[in-house]
């Protein structure tokens, strides 16, 4: 069974940094685009950053210049380096990925990891 497992969330002071990781486990799959989303209570989940299989990246405007998405295809892992964190970055962060299985394409989500930016 293919699944996404996230790690790296926590509590950080404003101006601090965190790095989130999301590893795809299982077998017999190819990973396409991978994304990071975030969600705060009462609001829709929003796309924060994405990276294609070829390494092209895109970012939501509020995180440009502060967050960096990257991937290690050998480890089937996507990262989100978050610098200069602000209180408004507080949210549950989710990764998702386009997964191509022998049975077809699926979009899978991680379980979410809490990021809290507070003094």
Image: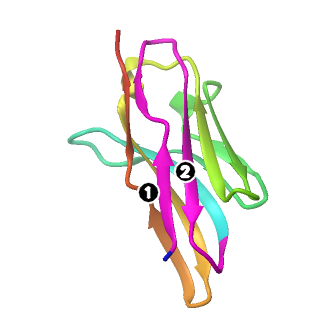
Q: Measured along the vertical axis of the image, is residue 43 above or below residue 74?
A: above
Q: Is residue 18 left or right of residue 91?
A: right
Residue 26 visible (yes or no): yes
Q: Residue at 57% across / 68% down in the picture?
A: 98
| Residue 9 screen position, x and y as percent | 44, 34
| Residue 103 screen position, x and y as percent | 56, 90
Q: Is residue 71 left or right of residue 100?
A: right
| Residue 86 screen position, x and y as percent | 44, 18
- What span is colored magenta in the figure? 2-30
Q: Measured along the vertical axis of the image, is residue 76 above or below residue 26?
A: above
Q: Is residue 41 magenta?
A: no
Circle 1: is it few (<14), some (14-19), or many (20+) Cα within 10 Å?
A: some
In the image, 5 versus 80, the foreground residue is 5
SS at mark 1 in the image: loop
Tell me the residue that label 2 is attached to: 22
Hey, which residue is sitting farthest top in the picture?
A: 119
Tell me the residue that label 1 is attached to: 110
Place residue 58 in its image quadrant: top right
SS at mark 2 in the image: strand
Q: Residue at 63% across / 50% down in the picture?
A: 78
Q: Is residue 58 left or right of residue 48?
A: right
Residue 47 visible (yes or no): no
| Residue 60 screen position, x and y as percent | 54, 39
The colour style of the image is rainbow
Q: Measured along the vertical axis of the image, is residue 3 above or below residue 117?
A: below
Q: Residue at 62% across / 78% down in the picture?
A: 100
Question: How far apart in space, not on screen, are marks 1 and 2 (Cα)?
Answer: 7 Å
């Amino acid at each position: 069974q293919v699944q996404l497992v996230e790690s790296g969330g926590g509590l950080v002071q404003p101006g601090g940094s965190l790095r989130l990781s999301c590893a795809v486990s299982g077998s017999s799959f190819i990973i396409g685009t991978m994304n990071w989303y975030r969600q705060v209570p009462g609001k829709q989940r929003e796309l924060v950053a994405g990276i294609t299989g070829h390494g092209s990246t895109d970012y939501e405007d509020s995180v440009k210049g502060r967050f960096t998405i990257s991937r290690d295809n050998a480890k089937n892992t996507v990262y989100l380096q978050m610098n200069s964190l602000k209180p408004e970055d507080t949210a549950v962060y989710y990764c998702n990925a386009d997964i191509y299985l022998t049975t077809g394409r699926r979009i899978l989500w991680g379980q979410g990891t809490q990021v809290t930016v507070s003094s």
